[in-house]
Amino acid sequence: MIYAVTIHIDKEVEKKWVRWMQDQHIPDVLGTKLFLGCRMMRSELTHKEGYTTYRMQYVLQSKDTYREYEEKYADEMRGQADKFFEGKYLAERDLLEMIRER
């Protein structure tokens, strides 16, 4: 399973947000021990004027571990983002089932 998070971050705070993601947020999410890893990517296309788009792919073992994350940790993790970047980002989340990988 992949928990995919797409963030459109205001270019004014982008550098600060990237440091925060790398130094605090992603390590905190992985620290829950529910995820096997994370990929952080920046889109080369403009999706929203004045914003840069990033995609994180958090690897999960199962839907059950996703549910546990949602129940125990998600509100706190999202609250941290709002504390530092409220009004400066838009988030989209999805849960993806791997069908085939080569």
Image (cartoon, helix red, strand yellow):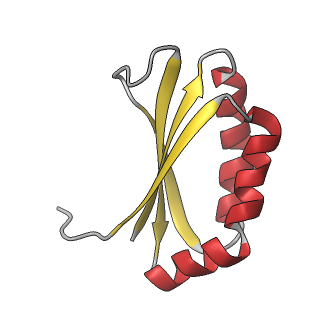
Q: Residue at x 33, y 22 (%)?
A: 45
Q: Is 65 located above or below residue 90 in the figure? A: below
Residue 101 locus on image (x, y percent): 21, 64
Q: Residue at x 20, y 71 (%)?
A: 99
Instruction: Using residue 2 as the reference point, say whether residue 5 is left or right of it.
Output: right
Residue 34 locus on image (x, y percent): 60, 75
* Observer-nearest of 79 and 39: 79
* Quadrant in the picture for the N terminus: bottom left
Q: Is 13 located above or below residue 64 in the figure? A: above
Q: Is 15 located above or below residue 69 in the figure? A: above
* Observer-nearest of 89 and 57: 89
Residue 10 locus on image (x, y percent): 60, 22
Q: Residue 42's quadrant in the figure?
A: top left
Q: Residue at x 71, y 49 (%)?
A: 25
Q: Residue at x 77, y 61 (%)?
A: 76
User: What residue occupies the far bottom of the structure in this picture?
Assistant: 64
* Quadrant in the picture for the C terminus: bottom left
Instruction: Using residue 20 as the reference point, say whether residue 89 is left or right of it.
Output: left
User: What residue occupies the far right of the structure in this picture?
Assistant: 83
